[in-house]
Amino acid sequence: MDTLGLLLQGFEVALTPANLMWAFLGSVLGTAIGILPGIGPALTIALLLPVTISVGPVSAFIMFAGVLYGAMYGGSTTSILINTPGEAGSMMTALEGNKMARAGRGAAALATAAIGSFVAGTIATLLLTFAAPVVAELAFVLKPADYFALTVLAFTSVAVVMGASRVRGFVSLFMGLALGVIGIDAMTGQPRMTFGMADLLDGVELTVVLVSVFAVGEILYVASRYSHGQEKIIPIKGKAWMTRDEWRRSWKPWLRGTAIGFPMGAIPGSGSEIPTMLSYSLEKKLSRHKDEFGKGAIEGVAGPEAANNAAAAGILVPLLTLGLPTSATAAILLAAFQNYGLQPGPFLFTGNPELVWGLIASLYIGNFMLLVLNLPLVGLWVRLLYIPKPQLYAGILVFAMMGIWGVSGSVFDLGLMAVLGLLSYAMRVYGFPIPPLLIGLILVPLAENQLRTALAAGQGQLSVLVETPVSMIFLSLALLSLFVPIILRRLRTAA
């Protein structure tokens, strides 16, 4: 069946009353957590994993998609009104958006952020609709050696790009790999790294790690840097809509931001920060109002916000078609698939089309819901900023503990959550990035399985790993990601 026919079937799934409710709930939750500083989509989806076990996979992923998109919308509100990004992708919005708010143009800044998010989200979802089936078809020709090379590329690029240094990135990655191999080896039946503890024979529960890292570790880190001073929230002033000149200055940055964000979101390690930075730099170079940058240029809000939302759709292409997460949020979504016994990849499109196309169709619906929720109701959302932070953080920790206890009923898992939470807090304090740990933990079973399969087919010859052009390309890109930054740095120093 053609793509449009499958998409129409997806709308039939997404437009059922129950799934519309889940899409609305995800959009509301996403907007709320995007607005609240220190809480992002990764943390929210991690907290929801234990709760959604009893919910069907289609409904759960429709809600998760709403959370992912909603956080992109909501993050701009705090960036503009209190100069505090609600999530990492909104950092660049704060540079110009807060200046606009201080100059009495807060309403225009919020409007261009919301409309830009809608435009970018819709165009990026269209690109996802037509790109994902093509990539899924190509994935059928990949051999085990190709998949192993792809995971190596994901490991190296994420470890190199994220974090204060590549050493910290690789330390974080190897910690994730170590956690991922704990338990009984599926091929030999031998226990690995269990240290004689029966509770570890089944491996480390993925949900426990995710909740520990994002709920416990993140909240401890945010709380340790909490200031008791009252945050100054700038009142929303100015017209509730943009002027004709502001429209004229915004529409091109929306399109350029989309063109940057969507492909960058699909690249391992780029996250939402890199495309928003690139978009801001591009708009600063192309703008006819360069003197306004740093004082409240609307292009500096429109472009990064569009790039932010387009990147959110971009991460779904490699995730759905190859099972490859390119960000922390994508890694948690992959874990959610595995919780339901599903493995994203080309067979997901043929074996579970209701889930894939229902999810893609829900992105169109959620985008429209978010536009309606954000433009007229922004004053209501701002009230969330008045929630006392100590009570908010304490509530999240309690909810995390209840979720883990509800899933496993194990005191050992609660203790493990506390240990891993303290470890992730220490990692944040000393600049060790979290995404490499998650991607190493989640992808190591796939990498190990594909490596063993390839070596078995090649009778133990390592040359089998570089026999296909695809594996050679992926491994070459992995090597380039390791050495090109070093070479460029030395050339810059020599110059």
Image (cartoon, rainbow, N blue to C red):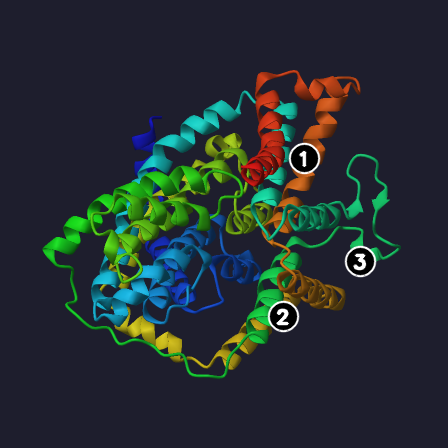
Q: Amino acid at mark 2?
A: Met
> With respect to residue 464, does 412 lie above or below?
below
The residue shown at (12%, 59%) is: 243
The residue shown at (21%, 67%) is: 105
Q: Nearer the viewer, mark 2 or mark 1?
A: 1
Q: Quadrant of the N terminus?
A: top left
Instruction: Report the residue that reaches farthest toward the left.
Output: 244
**Which residue is denoted by mark 3 in the rendering?**
199
Mark 1 is surrounded, within 10 Å at the Cα level, by few (under 14), some (14 to 19) or many (20 or more) other residues, namely many
> Dot 2 lies on which element?
helix
The residue shown at (27%, 73%) is: 379
Q: CA distance from mark 2 to mark 1?
A: 31 Å
> With respect to residue 134, does 217 lie above or below?
below
Give whichever of 353, 413 is nearer the camera. 413
Mark 2 is surrounded, within 10 Å at the Cα level, by few (under 14), some (14 to 19) or many (20 or more) other residues, namely many
Tag 2 near tag 3, CB within 8 Å: no
**Which residue is denoted by mark 1 in the rendering?**
447
> Dot 1 lies on which element?
helix
Give whichever of 4, 170 is nearer the camera. 170
Q: Position of residue 179 (x, y in %)?
A: 73, 50
Q: Amino acid at mark 1?
A: Ala
Q: Position of residue 75 (x, y in %)?
A: 38, 62
**Left or right: where does residue 230 sit relative to residue 418?**
left
**Camera sees residue 403:** no
**Which residue is denoted by mark 2 in the rendering?**
401
The residue shown at (49%, 49%) is: 57
**Left or right: where does residue 137 sit relative to residue 251?**
right
